[in-house]
Image (cartoon, rainbow, N blue to C red):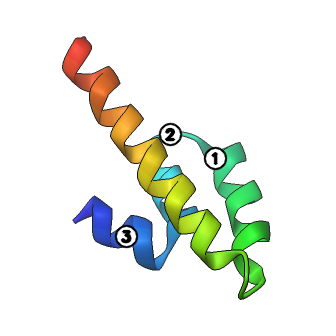
Amino acid sequence: MRFLLALLLPWLQFFTIGRPISGLICLVLQITVIGWVPAAIWSVYALTEYRAEQRNR
């Protein structure tokens, strides 16, 4: 479910993993149509890093 959120609303996904500043930066990036793709890629990458941190704990 989070991967779908990361692709459709990347900025919101950052808030769900506890990174609100990154979420605001991603929102500014996502406002432009060209920035949507990098924002989605960044969001998926951050989600995979978050899951790796959770696994290591």
Residue that sits furthest to the top in the current view: 57
CA gap between label 1 and label 3 equals 15 Å
Q: From the viewer's perspective, is 5 left or right of 18? A: left
Residue indicated by mark 1: 20
Q: Is residue 21 above or below residue 30?
A: above
CA gap between label 2 and label 1 equals 6 Å
Disc with the residue nearer the chain's start (1 vs 3): 3
Residue indicated by mark 2: 18
Residue indicated by mark 3: 5
Q: Quadrant of the N terminus?
A: bottom left
Disc with the residue nearer the chain's start (3 vs 2): 3
Q: Is residue 42 above or below residue 52?
A: below
Residue 5 lies, in percent from the top left, at 37, 70
Say if mark 2 contacts mark 1, CB within 8 Å.
yes
Pick whichever, 47 or 24, lies toward us: 47
Q: From the viewer's perspective, is 44 left or right of 36? A: left
Q: Is residue 5 above or below residue 18?
A: below
At label 3, the amino acid type is Leu
Crowdedness of circle 2 by 10 Å Cα count: few (<14), some, many (20+)?
few
Q: Which quarter of the figure has residue 21?
A: top right
At label 1, the amino acid type is Pro
Q: Which quarter of the figure has residue 23?
A: bottom right
- Residue located at (20% from left, 22% from top): 55
Residue 40 lies, in percent from the top left, at 52, 67
- Residue located at (58% from left, 74% from top): 37
Crowdedness of circle 1 by 10 Å Cα count: few (<14), some, many (20+)?
some
At label 2, the amino acid type is Gly
